[in-house]
């Protein structure tokens, strides 16, 4: 298993369910999806991590929100330790040259004030960093931090924009942008995401089963080649039709000239 910085433009999905067969992950590959983000708080996630990796997908982890926890700062370390434990059990390399990003789902804070949330997220990120990973935040609906406060978080180095109305993060920006959400892939609810480099060049770092392009990347490349081939065929057909039309036009002009010459 290696760390893998997702290139800009990579298509991904995030989901909170588990227990999906290899064929389901293959369905993602067929859509050109190259990475999946799984909820570390969902039972059975370790099996899904292994399955997704075996299919050639890159895998990232986020920790789904738990509203009652936000008001109790001491729970931040406990929650962080839980996602770190899942990452370690799954074999995510710690203290890598390019550290894997673990994400906190920051939303539905239940009216807890920004000062408390700021301290909570800072503590969460501190535990994640100490374990040898990068700490990132998914900025969702119902969280009280401004863009400036999000950027000022001392232990957070990556941001993921949800599909909700959320603030921009000054100076750094977002590495992941959620587009359409609550979509269905063979009956399973997913959200679609797109990778971009943030303003400092940062990219979301996941894990992959092997060095080199993932199966999803190859599938996407093959899809591009097929599309290009189809366009080339259509263009060739259009050129042939144009040549035929030009020949017919030339014949018509010649016929008209012949009529006038006879007169």
Image (cartoon, rainbow, N blue to C red):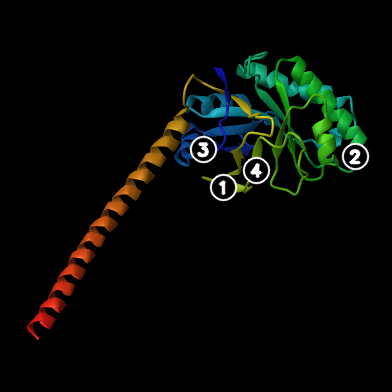
| Closer to viewer: mark 1 or mark 3 | 3
Circle 4 packing at 10 Å, graded few (<14), some (14-19), many (20+), is some
Give me the C-alpha separation between circle 1 and circle 2: 32 Å
**Residue 244 point in image, percent of width and height:** 20, 63
Crowd band around label 1 with a 10 angstrom C-alpha radius: few (<14), some (14–19), many (20+): few
- Of label 1 and label 4, which has the lower sequence position? 4
177 shown above or below 215 = below
Q: Which residue matches tag 4?
A: 178
For residue 112, above or below residue 46: below
x, y percentage for residue 150?
81, 35
Residue corresponding to mark 2: 112
Q: Are marks 1 and 3 in contact (CB under 8 Å)?
A: no
- The answer to the question of whether label 4 and label 3 lie on touching residues, with beta carbons closer than 8 A, is no
Q: Which residue is mark 3?
A: 33
Closer to the camera in the image, 12 or 261: 261
How busy is the neighbourhood of tag 2: few (under 14 within 10 Å), some, or many (20 plus)?
some
Secondary structure, mark 4, is strand
Distance between mark 4 and mark 2 Cα atoms: 25 Å
Q: Which mark is residue 184?
A: 1
Q: Nearer the viewer, residue 28 or 187?
A: 28
| Mark 3–mark 2 distance (CA, rounded to whole Å) | 36 Å
Choose between 49 and 30: the one closer to the eye: 30
Is tag 1's residue or tag 3's residue first in the polypeptide sequence? 3
Q: State yes or no: discs 1 and 4 in contact (Cβ < 8 Å).
A: no
Dot 2 falls on a residue whose secondary structure is loop
Disc 1 to disc 4, how far (Cα)?
15 Å
| Identity of the residue drawn at 7% across and 83% down | 262
Q: Are marks 4 and 2 in contact (CB under 8 Å)?
A: no
* Earlier sequence position, callout 4 versus callout 3: 3
């Amino acid at each position: 298993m290696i760390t893998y910085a997702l290139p800009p433009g990579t298509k991904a999905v995030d989901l909170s369910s588990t227990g999906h067969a290899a064929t389901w992950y293959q369905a993602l590959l067929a859509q050109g999806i190259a990475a999946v983000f799984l909820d570390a708080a969902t039972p059975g996630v370790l099996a899904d991590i292994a399955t997704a990796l075996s299919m050639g997908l890159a895998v990232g982890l986020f920790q789904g929100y738990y509203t009652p926890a936000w008001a109790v700062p001491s729970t931040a370390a406990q929650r962080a330790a839980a996602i770190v434990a899942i990452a370690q059990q799954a074999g995510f390399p710690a203290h890598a040259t390019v550290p894997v990003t673990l994400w906190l789902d920051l939303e539905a804070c239940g009216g807890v004030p920004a000062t408390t949330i700021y301290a909570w997220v800072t503590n969460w990120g501190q535990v994640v960093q100490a374990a040898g990973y990068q700490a990132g935040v998914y900025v969702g609906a119902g969280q009280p931090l401004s863009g400036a406060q999000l950027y000022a978080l001392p232990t957070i180095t990556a941001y993921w924009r949800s599909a909700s109305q959320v603030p921009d993060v000054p100076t750094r920006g977002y590495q992941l942008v959620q587009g359409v959400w609550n979509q269905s892939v063979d009956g399973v609810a997913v959200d679609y995401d797109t990778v971009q480099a943030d303003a400092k060049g940062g990219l979301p770092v996941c894990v992959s089963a092997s060095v080199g392009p993932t199966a999803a990347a190859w599938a996407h490349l093959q899809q591009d080649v097929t599309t290009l081939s189809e366009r080339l065929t259509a263009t060739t057909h259009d050129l042939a039709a144009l040549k035929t039309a030009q020949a017919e036009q030339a014949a018509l002009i010649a016929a008209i000239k012949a009529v006038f010459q006879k007169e």
